[in-house]
């Protein structure tokens, strides 16, 4: 449809593998861009009960990010465990987000601190994983019409502090946006390096 020869693509990417890895990286960049735009639009999106559902829905709308998160080799094949895929995931994947953002919430007074940060990270990850499973199983949805609302309430109950100040919320939004910008810069560098897929 583009009226160019198939070989033209190899002027830009050395192999199909490199092209697909670039697409995976671009989807991660799009997720970060969407999250950043929402934080710019409304800093309250930095609250755990708002950010977690937002991130889950954004990731869920990105097939390659979702496939990498689920370690779905039926979609990604050998790229699932490719070193570049792993590096992209470590820079901007959901686990990297939680490892960075839970401490941000704690430091900014948006998350409770009476229990260990590592335990909080694991608990949020378990809730996210559970929400993904429930959304894929229609029989499990018979008790609620809105699993994301239940997920948000669970995050709030488990994690959030009462009435953080506007300054605390805005500080968390700024720190989360910095993480997203730094992660995006790493991903862009990874997928821009000649021969990165080798």
Image (cartoon, grey):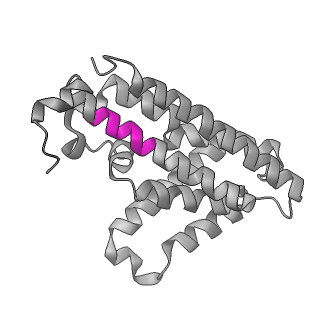
Spot the residue most to the front: 3
Residue drawn 17% across the image and 47% down it: 2
Quarter of the image holding residue 41? bottom right
Asked whether, in this view, residue 181 is left or right of residue 5, the answer is: right
- Residue depicted at x 39% and y 27%: 191
| 78 versus 159 height, above or below | above
What segment carries the magenta color?
Answer: 20-28
Q: Position of residue 143 (x, y in %)?
A: 45, 82
Q: What residue do we see at 45% from left, 42% from top?
A: 28
Residue 37 in the image: state x and y as whole percent.
Answer: 61, 54
114 versus 6 height, above or below: below
Above-or-below relation of 111 to 133: above
At 27% from the left and 45% from the top, the residue drawn is: 72
**Is residue 24 a member of the stretch shown in magenta?**
yes
**Any magenta on residue 125?**
no
Residue 60 in sight: yes
x and y percent of residue 182 in the render? 61, 32
Tell me residue 61's x, y (percent).
40, 59
**Residue 102 visible in image:** no
- Number of numbered discs overlaid on the protein picture: 0
In front of the other: 164 or 189: 189
Predominant secondary structure in magenta?
helix
């Amino acid at each position: 449809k583009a009226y160019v020869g198939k070989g033209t693509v190899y002027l830009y990417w050395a192999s199909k593998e490199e092209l697909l890895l670039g697409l995976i990286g671009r989807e991660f960049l799009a997720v970060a861009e969407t999250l950043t735009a929402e934080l710019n639009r409304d800093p309250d999106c930095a609250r755990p009960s708002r950010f977690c559902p937002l991130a889950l829905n954004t990731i869920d709308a990105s097939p390659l990010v979702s496939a990498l998160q689920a370690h779905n080799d039926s979609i990604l094949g050998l790229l699932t465990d490719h070193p570049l895929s792993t590096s992209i995931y470590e820079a901007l994947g959901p686990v990297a987000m939680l490892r960075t953002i839970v401490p941000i919430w704690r430091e900014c007074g948006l998350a409770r601190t009476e229990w260990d940060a590592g335990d909080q990270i694991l608990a949020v990850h378990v809730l996210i994983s559970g929400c993904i499973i429930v959304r894929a199983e229609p029989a499990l949805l018979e008790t609620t019409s809105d699993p994301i609302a239940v997920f948000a309430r669970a995050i709030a109950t488990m994690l959030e502090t009462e009435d953080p100040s506007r300054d605390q919320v805005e500080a968390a939004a700024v720190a989360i946006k910095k993480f997203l910008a730094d992660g995006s810069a790493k991903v862009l560098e990874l997928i821009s390096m000649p021969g990165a897929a080798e």
